[in-house]
Amino acid sequence: MTTETAILGGGCFWCLEAAYSELAGILAVQSGYAGGHVENPTYKQVCSGATGHAEVVKLTYDPAIISYDDVLKVFFTIHDPTTLNRQGGDVGTQYRSVIFTTGPAQEAAAKAAIAEFSKLWPGKIVTEVAPAPAFYQAEPEHDQYYARNPYAGYCQAVVAPKVAKVRKMFFDRLRHKPA
């Protein structure tokens, strides 16, 4: 089996991890940090906004099951790519919309997706597209955060609606379809 990697930032990594974990073909989702100037940053450092890192997820996926274009469709559906350095109440450069690409094909696909989704969003898409920098894995307590804390206030208010949106809009792509 051939696998590929995508690195995406669209606000809090808990949201992206929970949403992408629902999809068939997504083999692994790892929360982490990328795009900054501090090596091996901590969550506290990244949340300060002083590291330059964005909260991101690194996806490992099977392109025979889910294409990079479909990965990007989900990305542009579950977050607001028109708000600079914020997602809802999460504010700061660490919450920016960013696609870190692993090569020219991903860069071209990301730019094409931005052009396509620009027709659907009322504001200008501010998603950054840049070559993939070093990825730093987040601390273990962030792994499967939503799955372990579904009733936490943030998860109920912010993460759950994004997961519900993925389940509704990408029902045919779900790993496990509800009965």
Image (tube, grey):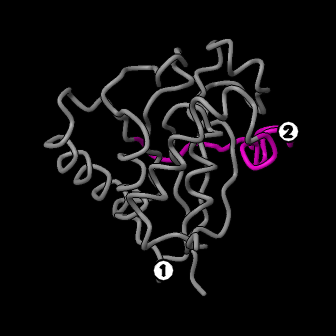
Residue at the location (51% across, 45% down)?
8
Reply above or below: 88 against 1: above
Q: Earlier in the sequence, mark 1 or mark 2?
A: 1
Q: Nearer the viewer, residue 62 or 146?
A: 146
Reply above or below: 72 against 76: below
Residue corresponding to mark 1: 65
**In the rendered structure, are the residues bearing label 1 and label 2 in contact, judged by CB atoms less than 8 Å apart?**
no
- Disc 2 packing (10 Å; few <14; some 14–19; many ≥20): few
Question: In the rendering, at what x and y percent does residue 24 appear?
Answer: 55, 73
Where is residue 12, by image quadrant? top right
Q: Residue furthest front?
A: 179
Residue at the location (54% across, 49% down)?
163
Question: In the rendering, at what x and y percent does residue 146 appear?
Answer: 72, 43
Reply above or below: 22 against 55: below
Q: Which quadrant of the rendered structure holds the C terminus? A: bottom right
Q: Residue furthest right?
A: 140
Which stretch is magenta?
A: 130-149
Q: Secondary structure at mark 2?
A: helix
**Amino acid type, callout 2:** Glu
Reply above or below: 144 against 136: below
Residue at the location (51% across, 39% down)?
9
Residue corresponding to mark 2: 141
Magenta region includes residue 76? no
Q: Which quadrant of the rendered structure holds the N terminus? A: bottom right
**From the viewer's perspective, is 87 left or right of 44?**
left
